[in-house]
Amino acid sequence: MFNHYFFGGDDSRSDYLQFLKKCSDGDSANILVVVDPPFGGHVAVIAFTLQRIADDYKNMQKGTVHK
């Protein structure tokens, strides 16, 4: 959650990108991310990860995601 790191390596990142692609298909493609950070988690760090997800999602819709 805090660093947008995929502990499973390339397979995990590939699963993530496939999920975003599946969510971005269709006319009314939307995604909801529910966050339950640990107490004391820095908001800026969580915001960074959420922004990366948003950027990947937008790029997936455009077809420009970097693998």
Image (spheres, rainbow, N blue to C red):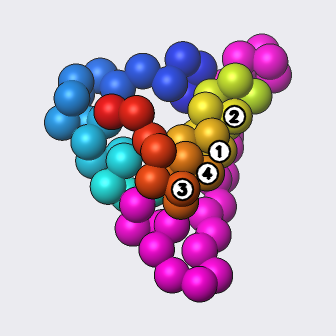
Image quarter in which the C terminus is found:
top left
> CB of mark 1 within 8 Å of CB of mark 4?
yes
Q: Is residue 7 above or below residue 23?
A: above
Question: Could you say which is closer to the camera, residue 22 or residue 44?
Answer: 22
Left or right: 67 with respect to 51?
left
- For the residues labelled 2 and 1, the Cα–Cα distance comes to 5 Å
Q: Nearer the viewer, mark 1 or mark 4?
A: 4
Q: Nearer the viewer, mark 3 or mark 1?
A: 3
The amino acid marked with disc number 2 is Gln
Q: Please state the extent of the stretch shown in magenta in the rendering.
A: 21-45
> CB of mark 3 within 8 Å of CB of mark 4?
yes
Q: Is residue 21 above or below residue 36?
A: below
The amino acid marked with disc number 1 is Ala
Confirm whether the magenta stretch covers residue 67.
Answer: no
Work out whether mark 3 precedes mark 1 in sequence or the reverse, and give the earlier one: 1
Q: Position of residue 20 (x, y in %)?
A: 45, 56
Residue farthest along the bottom direction in this orientation: 27
Question: Circle 1 sits on which residue?
Answer: 54
> CB of mark 2 within 8 Å of CB of mark 1?
yes
The amino acid marked with disc number 3 is Lys
